[in-house]
């Protein structure tokens, strides 16, 4: 068994789903492992990771609107408001999704389905620089 680790930094433009499939796939391929398990970990509490359809952009828009309705940015609802009206809702949205993904690696590639992509889900309204830790265990 071998291990490889790296970090991937991506800049967001504010709230939304930002696809990171390609840079993650390039890194996995460069490791030269045929089989294994990739762990992707978002090192933030107001952003998350999701695997979603990457063919129809309407899916991303629908998800973004759904989370805005589900967790409104209303300061009257929260005690934690020091960092702005979007901060506590961002923490809740992150808790409802996940900050870690486990993806099998088969034949040197992530075993994602045809329409699946990896997305950083930015929950804050301002642009941020987000870091993902990637760990690949395999052979």
Image: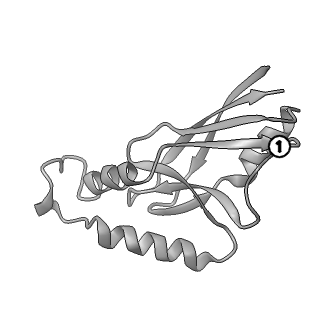
Please identify the quarter of the rendering in which residue 41 is found: top right
Q: Work out whether 137 lies above or below 116.
A: above
Q: Is residue 116 left or right of residue 98?
A: right
| Place of residue 63 in the rendered image (x, y in percent of width and height, measured from the top left) | 47, 71
Q: Which residue corresponds to the image point at 50% horizontal and 56% vertical from the top-left?
A: 121
Q: Quadrant of the N terminus?
A: top right
Q: Is residue 26 left or right of residue 116?
A: right
Using a 10 Å C-alpha cutoff, classify the residue at mark 1 as few (fewer than 14 neighbours), some (14 to 19) or many (20 or more). some
| Place of residue 88 in the rendered image (x, y in percent of width and height, measured from the top left) | 26, 52
Q: Work out whether 117 lies above or below 62.
A: above
Judging by the rendered image, the residue that carries numbered circle 1 is 106
Q: Work out whether 2 lies above or below 101.
A: above
Circle 1 SS class = strand
Of the pair 85 and 101, the residue shown nearer to us = 101
Q: Is residue 130 left or right of residue 24?
A: left
Q: Quadrant of the C terminus?
A: top right
| Place of residue 10 in the rendered image (x, y in percent of width and height, measured from the top left) | 60, 47
Q: Which residue corresponds to the image point at 51% horizontal and 60% vertical from the top-left?
A: 13
Q: Which residue corresponds to the image point at 31% horizontal and 73% vertical from the top-left?
A: 69
Q: Which residue corresponds to the image point at 79% horizontal and 20% vertical from the top-left?
A: 2
């Amino acid at each position: 068994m071998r291990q490889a680790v790296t970090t991937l930094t991506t800049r967001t433009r504010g709230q939304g789903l930002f696809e990171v499939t390609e840079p993650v796939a390039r890194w996995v391929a460069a490791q030269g492992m045929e089989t294994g398990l990739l762990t992707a970990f978002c090192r933030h509490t107001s952003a998350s990771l999701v695997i979603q359809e990457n063919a129809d952009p309407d899916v991303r828009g629908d998800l973004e609107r759904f989370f805005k309705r589900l967790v409104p940015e209303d300061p009257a609802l929260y005690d934690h408001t020091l960092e702005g009206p979007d901060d506590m809702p961002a923490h809740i949205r992150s808790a409802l999704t996940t900050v870690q993904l486990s993806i099998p690696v088969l034949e040197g590639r992530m075993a994602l389905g045809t329409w699946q992509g990896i997305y950083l889900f930015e929950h804050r309204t301002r642009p941020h620089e987000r870091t993902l830790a990637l760990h690949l265990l395999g052979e």
